[in-house]
Image (cartoon, grey):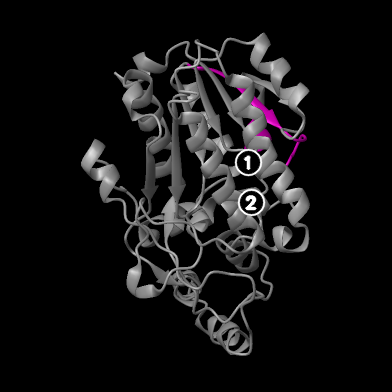
């Protein structure tokens, strides 16, 4: 039934050459959708190119902060469903260059949504936000719930909170765009080639037999949700919104409800690969580190998704380590 829905649907994915965008495009193509994508540039290290997914899509290379570029694409092609995933996603980059991050994440969002105004052919728009849009809450008030107000301070977090507010405005009765906003925990899995992220960095360090350099003391608490769960959820939300416009304006959190300290993630990876001595060395380095520009506690409550759609994650971190490691092993063996 899911395949029948997606057959020949005309879909646009912004940020298609990113980790989530590539995996989403891969699944949509399997289901028979006509996939178009926007990316800032050709990233040959992306899953999109590694697995030759790009040969089955129509791609547009350009900057979403350029309104004329976006408007031309939206006018030309009669899309039915849109996934807005494009963003500058690296927290460290945002801290060093907030302007570029805000141009992409804030201007890019209102450029895109404004270009869609009065386009009756578009029936569902999924805007990817982040758990970081909530900002920092005391641990006792976590997990985050959808009705929490933003307390964002750091540049990346502010960019996602602003994009959320913009999306809510365009979904309001004033503009009536069919938008659902998603706020997900840290996503991991095959195809994640941003090695500034924890799990890709861990896998590469083990495979290349190099020291893992922690960026903090490992006490930050995070929730990690598997890419297959996220792709399934995006497809579910888009389909439900397409069929039920009354969902417009809704916000949904997703995670696993199994938060872990960063040092516990590191431990699970090293112990799983029988590298206990290396783990001990990493822990000694971690204890001397200080974490800057990061929210200390972040994990999500997904009860709203469960209530609306019966959704819950199928995968957990322990059971996916092998699949993740093997993907990086294959991907990095010739590099």
**N-terminal of the two: label 1 or label 2?**
1
Instruction: Tell me the quadrant of the picture where the N terminus can be found.
Output: top left
| Percent x, y of residue 35 | 57, 20
Q: Label 2, on which residue?
A: 89
Residue 38 belongs to magenta span: yes
Q: Label 1, on which residue?
A: 18
Task: Tell whether 304 sits left or right of 77.
Answer: left
| Percent x, y of residue 59 | 69, 23
Task: Tell whether 64 sits left or right of 30.
Answer: right
Of labels 1 and 2, the one closer to you = 2
Within the image, what quadrant is residue 50 found in? top right
Q: Residues within 10 Å of mark 1 (few under 14, many from 20)?
A: many
Task: Tell whether 64 sits left or right of 200.
Answer: right
In the rendered view, tell whether residue 167 sits above or below residue 5: below
Q: Are marks 1 and 2 in contact (CB under 8 Å)?
A: yes
Residue at left offset 64%, top offset 21%: 115
Give the CA distance from mark 1 to mark 2: 10 Å
Residue range corresponding to the magenta coloring:
33-52
Outermost residue on the front side: it is: 174
Q: Residues within 10 Å of mark 2 (few under 14, many from 20)?
A: some
Residue 21 belongs to magenta span: no
**SS state under label 2:** loop
**SS state under label 1:** loop
Within the image, what quadrant is residue 217 found in? bottom right
| Percent x, y of residue 208 | 68, 65
Q: Is residue 10 visible?
A: yes
């Amino acid at each position: 039934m899911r395949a029948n829905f997606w057959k020949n649907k005309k879909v646009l994915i912004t940020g298609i050459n990113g980790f989530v965008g590539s995996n989403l495009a891969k699944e949509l193509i399997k289901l028979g959708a006509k996939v178009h994508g926007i990316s800032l540039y050709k990233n040959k290290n992306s899953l999109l190119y590694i697995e030759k997914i790009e040969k089955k899509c129509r791609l547009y290379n350009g900057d979403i902060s350029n309104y004329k570029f976006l408007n031309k694409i939206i006018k030309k092609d009669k899309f039915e469903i849109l996934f807005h995933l494009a963003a500058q996603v690296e927290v460290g980059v945002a801290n060093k260059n907030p302007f570029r991050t805000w141009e992409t994440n804030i201007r890019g969002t209102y450029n895109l949504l404004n270009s869609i105004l009065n386009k009756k052919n578009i029936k569902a728009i999924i805007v990817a936000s982040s758990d970081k849009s909530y900002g920092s809450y005391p641990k006792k008030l976590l997990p985050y719930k959808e009705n929490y107000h933003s307390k964002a301070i750091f540049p990346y977090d502010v960019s996602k909170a602003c994009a959320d507010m913009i999306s809510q405005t365009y979904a309001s009765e004033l503009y009536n765009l069919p938008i659902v906003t998603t706020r997900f925990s840290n996503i991991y899995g095959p195809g994640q080639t941003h090695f500034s992220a924890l799990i890709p960095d861990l896998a590469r360090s083990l495979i290349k037999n190099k020291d893992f350099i922690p960026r903090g003391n490992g006490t930050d608490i995070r929730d990690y949700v598997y890419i297959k769960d996220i792709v399934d959820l995006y497809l579910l939300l888009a389909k439900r919104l397409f069929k039920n416009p009354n969902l417009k304006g809704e916000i949904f959190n997703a995670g696993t409800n199994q938060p872990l300290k960063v040092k516990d993630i590191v431990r699970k990876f090293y112990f799983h690969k029988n590298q206990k001595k290396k783990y001990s060395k990493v822990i000694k380095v971690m204890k001397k580190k200080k974490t800057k520009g990061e929210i200390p506690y972040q994990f999500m409550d997904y009860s709203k998704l469960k209530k609306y759609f019966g959704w819950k994650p199928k995968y957990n971190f322990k059971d996916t380590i092998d699949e993740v490691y093997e993907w990086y092993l294959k991907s990095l063996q010739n590099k």
